[in-house]
Image (tube, coloured by chain):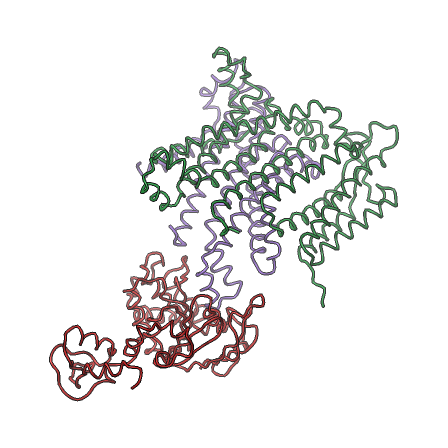
Chain colours: A red, B purple, C green
Amino acid sequence: MIEIDAITKTYDEIAVVDDVSMVIEPRTITVVVGTSGSGKTTLLRMINRLVEPTSGEIRLDGDDNRSMPAHELRRRIGYAIQGHGLFPHRTVAQNIATVPRLLGWEKPRMDAKVAELLTLFQLEPEIFGPRYPHQLSGGQQQRVGVARALAAEPNVLLMDEPFGALDPIIRAKAQDDLLAIQKHFGTTIVLVTHDMNEAFHLANKIAVMDKGKVVQYGPPVELVRAPTTDFVKTLIGDAERPFRLLSVANAAAAVEPGEAEGEPIQEDRSQQDALAALLWSGRDALPVVSVGGKPIGRIKLSTLLKRAARLQ
Amino acid sequence: MRAWLPTALRGLLLLALLAFLVSPESFEPLLKPLVQQDAPAIYNHGSLLSLTLQHLRTVFIATAAATIIAIGLAILVTRPIGAEFLPLSRSLVNIGQTFPPVAVLALAVPAVGFGEKPTLIALFLYGLLPIFENTLTALTNLPRSVMEAARGAGMTGFQRLFQVELPLSLPVIVAGIRLSVVINLSTATIGSTVAAKTLGEVIIAGLQSNNLAFILQGGLIVGALAILIYDSLSGVEKLLTRRVGRR
Amino acid sequence: MKIRFDKLGVVIALVAACGVFSSFAVLKPNRILQGQAQSILDALPSGMGWGLLLVLVMAGTAAVLRMTAWAKLIAAAAALLVLVLAMGYAATFLTPSGNSYARVSPASGFWLLLFAFALLAADAMTRLRPPPWMRILFLVIAAFGIGGVLMSGSWNGLSIMKEYSGRADVFWTEAGRHVMLALGSLAAAVAVGLPLGIFCHRFTALKDAVLNTLNLIQTIPSIALFGLLIGPLAWFAATVPGAANIGIRGIGAAPAFVALFLYSLLPVVANTVIGLAGVPREANDAARGIGMTDRQRLFDVELPLALPVILTGIRIVLVQNIGLATIAALIGGGGFGVFVFQGIGQTAMDLVLLGAVPTVAMAFAAAVVLDASIEMNFRVQNGARSA
């Protein structure tokens, strides 16, 4: 659990982060969104003390994050950034082993961890381990960057626009990978982005920052249904509200007993995907199957239309 | 161009240089046409080989000292503790480059007398600048994301310096050392005007006795040394650049 | 509130303190013999000595405390001026009346103090970040200041000025020669190097060959290159009719001029090539897209955009040439080197200074002026962003 308690950071008398308090639950993904200059990156960097706050306190599992030297704190917190920041003079394996080496792990344990992570990120350890970062593609570099951040098995992973430099197709894949990894390790992730689609795709909770303040902090649905300020409304976009609502809910949640014709949809896809399939094929209902492929019911177009409306 | 040609040329140059230094007499027929009837065509007031070695020794000592001090200073002014000195150190480097080597050499004489010492001082001071400037440039232009990642991974200041900053800066630092050595090889010849034992002695003897062969052999030995050292340091630099993955 | 110290100021004050406790001036029985060192209080009448110390302590205090850059600059300038005037006075004070052989020179303490406060001035100037025109203004003020001190005759008692007064005519001839060598060879190098650079940029096949050749020339030590050109030029003067009449001879200024020219070519050509290669592709594409001919593109787009880099090359050449021109004296080419080498020969260090100090001053002034013009150019191109 990360407790951010009345944190303020001022540069030259200007508050970049202004009296922010929030609690981040363990094993969740929290996405901080906002325009550039809203203070979201500064807030993130205060968690691992790359920036020291002017006032306030941040507690990790109850302990003040200033209770140990900053570099020791950072070794316990994963950190991944835009443009990956891989060390160009070290191989992929050496890059991933950075923090374990700083922590003084035994060699066999390091090697095993590197191999495990590379495999997890679908990079063949024997092939990619000895390569240098410049010999990888952009998407591969980014995956190694995240793998490096996870190498010492941190409870908390901080990510600063980690997918900002990727093209849309690779980015979508990287986001899905991240969700899978988060499930695998149960890491608490705090991710900063300005991409609302990314936020809705990944977040358990979204914090919207504007001029140094957190103007709204809650589950994605809440942001769409009850935006607290005009700024949040603009950020979400009027025209996209109904689709955003559908995008954060599983197809499983809209299933009712019964049968339907045509191509089925898997229960873990979003309701937005289900709506798209219905509209495109011109049907009134479509069958839903479990992840295993077993039929479990159907979704009706009218149900989805109701769910997309403001009031339910 | 064929890939082996430059290497072959360098090997040839090295062989020619060694042959000339070990047995200068065998080259006499080549140089004879450049001098008047009775004048000697090969420098005869000392062994060319020992002069060359002394020349190299002087340059090596001065450059080694300059390298240590320059890198140390550049590291100091890029740490938080020395940050106040950074702006001034930049302008000092700029001003320092306006001091001509001859002036530095001549001005060192009253302080330490004639001989090798003023030459060492001049070469040291003149060698400092390129290395300091390059090290400073390298240390202040490291990729931001890499430095950020190093900090985020929990490296201490020392670990960042020795594991990330210096390894990444090395090619640029070597380029500075290379520049420094080549300048100093040439400047060391001027040291002979204040009685230092360098190859400049041969050239100055040639100027004084109007002996073109002396001037030519002195100049060519220094030129060949410069080319060979320049080339091998370029090689080192390329190797390092490839190692830090920037082609 | 706690008094905060300036780290650099502390270093400067320490250097200055060393200077105060070292000898200020040296009195020699004649221009060559070793002399007798004198401290500040010995070298000046006691009132004046204490006065000088007071000014130095005040300026040192200004250096140590955290103050505005302007305050520090004024403190440094005041200290330097007082120091220089006191040196001149010390010379007249120490020289026994009627003794025309005795010489007074500045000693290590004076140089340390000069260095310390020049450092303070340089640091203050760096922190002020003066715009280019202000830097040139500072240079002009400094030049007038030094000129004023020299013209006033307050330094006439010093050994270096006695060396000067003995050869005032020669000094200015050699100064003219020095400028001619440095600037003339630069002009020739630009006239040849700029087109050559453009040519290399257009025909890449040529580039490596030209740059490698010029690189080779740079490895030949300057004194050897000067010497090697004596032969060909002597032959040229003897065989080409009229060549001798326009001053081309084996020894003298001609080989020095040619050597400097050859050394200058590499920075000019290389920087022209680098500058042209650095022109953004979009700018070139746009120029082609709106229908410019190659010639229009060169003069309206490429050269203006490459100008800062080309000017940087010219700056390197000019500063380097001013320094190298001293070597011309070894082959009878004249210039300030004449005094340097005569001084080394006679072990008369004040004569060395007479050659070296103007050379350094000239190189420094050239660097300031060219840096300012490069920055002005750069600012025009990059607008407010570079500020």
Side (left or right) of B144 relative to C86: left
Which residue: 82% across, 38% down? C89
Q: Split into 4 quadrants, where in the image is the N terminus of chain B?
A: top left
Quarter of the view holding residue A227: bottom left
For residue C78, above or below residue C340: below
What is the x, y in percent for residue C22? 78, 46
For residue B246, above or below residue A31: above
Could you tell me how many numbered marks the image carries?
0
Which residue: 18% across, 78% down? A265
For residue A102, above or below residue B99: below
Side (left or right) of C288 relative to A304: right
Side (left or right) of B68 relative to C344: left
C304 and C78: which is toward the camera: C304
Which residue: 52% across, 71% down? A70
What is the x, y in percent for residue B156? 52, 66
What is the x, y in percent for residue B77? 58, 55
C84 and C16: which is toward the camera: C84
Which residue is outermost to the left? A261
What is the x, y in percent for residue C8? 66, 55
